[in-house]
């Protein structure tokens, strides 16, 4: 039972930890600058520097819906020029894109091996304009649409800033001019405009995180999933303290309403000492716990006034003495096992008495299974009485299956149904 409680409480504690920390910053401003390379289309004989052409920059505003996905709106600028010893050209490219962002580091659980390095992926679409600054079509604006896809590596510098390194590819559609501005694209199909412009960028920059939270979504980690060893040890230690049974009565301290009952005291499910005969003397001090008597006689009635067997028989047969079980278990619960000791002691003092053990189960589960379970419960008490020295000829046991007299919708009622009762013959 304690193992079940321990597992449940640990799961609850960790689940609470998952709900306790759900605040993180969502906004950031991303600023980057670096180089680019125009791939195609180019007029024959014109070449862009390979691999470096300094002159790419972008600035964006990003919002993360959660620690894994977000969106950003960014503005980019690119400047293209000729490679040394080739015909001169100069062109500018302007773009605005709306992109989706995926925090690939969190999706792939990079936090299991690093919490300072991360990876973002982004993809989106937008509009662009190519403007040659010299050449045949100088100052002619070529408007187009574009797609962008890229990866951004991150290094965390602090809770408010991260260093970025990005590589992106821009695919331009309906592009009419070459990047050098000296020729138009010849279309094999009249009126057909496809994705025919390609260039890529490589930039370095910074992300500045905005908000009142202690961290940004880029770096947010749910504590419950990756608790430290010390955090787990502290939580388990607290739960073990709750499950201590200081007085050894089988009821954990956090459920025990009398946590200091004496050793050997018979208690109920809340750890309270029992006085079965109601004579004001607790059972563990009462030499006749089922027969009322004065304290001067240690709880026993005056000689020759009443037969103990009659009182015990009435208490047992009326259902005041029972052994209880956990769900789907044939092992007596600790707080009720003392009932077996009292029956054993009574049978030793009254050798002519015989007892039948009646096992019961609640109504949860298949009926045939519950019949077998109720018999196993009765057999468990039988074995304990035999081990206590009671002759087997004086004991019989039987499983009676489900106790349908209780409300199966009530957890407390179902607990009362999971029992072994005694009948004195």
Image (cartoon, rainbow, N blue to C red):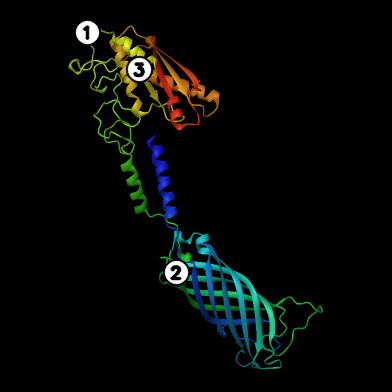
Q: For the point 49% across and 27% down, which residue is it? A: 407
Q: In this view, does 223 lie above or below 346?
A: below
Label 1: which residue?
A: 303
Q: Is residue 403 above or below residue 348?
A: below
Q: Is residue 303 above or below residue 46?
A: above
Please state if 251 lies on the left or on the right of 107 as rendered.
left
**Where does residue 219 sit, x and y in percent of width and height?**
45, 65
Is 347 in front, or is 43? 347
Label 3: which residue?
A: 385
* Image quarter of residue 123: bottom right
**Distance from label 1 to label 3 (Cα)?**
29 Å
**Distance from label 1 to label 2 (Cα)?**
84 Å
Q: For the point 59% across and 83% down, which residue is it? A: 78
| Disc 3 residue crowd, few under 14, some 14–19, many 20+, Cα 10 Å | many
Please state if 114 lies on the left or on the right of 199 as rendered.
left
**Where does residue 181 sit, x and y in percent of width and height?**
69, 89
Numbered mark located on residue 211 in the image = 2
Which quarter of the rendered picture does the N terminus lie within? top left
Task: State the SS at label 3.
Answer: helix
> In this view of the protein, can residue 97 be seen by the observer?
yes
The mark tally for this picture is: 3
């Amino acid at each position: 039972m304690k193992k079940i409680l321990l597992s449940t409480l640990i799961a609850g504690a960790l689940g609470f930890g998952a709900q306790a920390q759900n605040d993180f910053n969502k906004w950031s401003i991303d600023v980057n600058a670096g180089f680019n390379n125009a791939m195609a289309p180019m007029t024959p004989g014109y070449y862009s520097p390979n691999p470096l052409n300094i002159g790419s920059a972008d600035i964006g505003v990003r919002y993360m819906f959660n620690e894994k996905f977000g969106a950003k709106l960014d503005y980019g600028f690119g400047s293209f020029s000729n490679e040394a010893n080739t015909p001169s050209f100069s062109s500018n490219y302007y773009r605005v894109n709306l992109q989706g962002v995926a925090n690939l580091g969190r999706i792939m659980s990079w936090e299991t091996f690093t919490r300072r390095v991360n990876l973002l992926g982004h993809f989106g679409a937008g509009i662009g304009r190519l403007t040659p600054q010299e050449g045949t079509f100088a100052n002619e604006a070529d408007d187009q649409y574009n797609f962008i896809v890229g990866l951004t590596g991150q290094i965390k510098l602090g809770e408010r800033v991260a260093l970025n390194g990005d590589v992106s590819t821009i695919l331009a559609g309906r592009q009419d001019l070459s990047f050098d501005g000296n020729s138009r694209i010849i279309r094999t199909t009249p009126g057909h405009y496809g994705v025919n412009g390609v260039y890529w960028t490589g930039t370095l920059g910074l992300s500045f995180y905005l908000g009142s939270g202690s961290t940004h979504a880029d770096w947010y980690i749910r504590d419950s999933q990756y608790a430290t060893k010390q955090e787990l040890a502290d939580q388990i230690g607290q739960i073990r303290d709750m499950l201590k049974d200081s007085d050894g009565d089988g009821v954990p301290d956090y459920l025990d309403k009398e946590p200091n009952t004496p050793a050997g005291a018979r208690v109920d499910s809340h750890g309270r000492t029992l006085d079965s005969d109601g004579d004001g003397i607790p059972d563990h001090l009462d030499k006749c716990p089922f027969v009322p008597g004065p304290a001067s006689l240690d709880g026993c009635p005056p000689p020759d006034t009443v037969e103990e067997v009659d009182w015990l028989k009435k208490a047992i047969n009326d259902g005041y003495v029972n052994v209880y079980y956990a769900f789907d278990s044939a092992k007596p619960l600790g707080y009720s096992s003392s009932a077996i000791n009292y029956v054993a002691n009574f049978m030793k003092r009254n050798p002519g008495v015989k007892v039948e053990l009646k096992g019961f189960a609640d109504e949860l589960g298949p009926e045939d299974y519950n019949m077998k379970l109720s018999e196993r419960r009765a057999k468990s008490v039988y074995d304990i009485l035999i081990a206590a020295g009671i002759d087997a000829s004086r004991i019989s046991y039987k499983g009676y299956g489900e106790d349908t007299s209780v409300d199966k919708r009530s957890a407390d009622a179902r607990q009362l149904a999971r029992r072994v009762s005694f009948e004195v013959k």
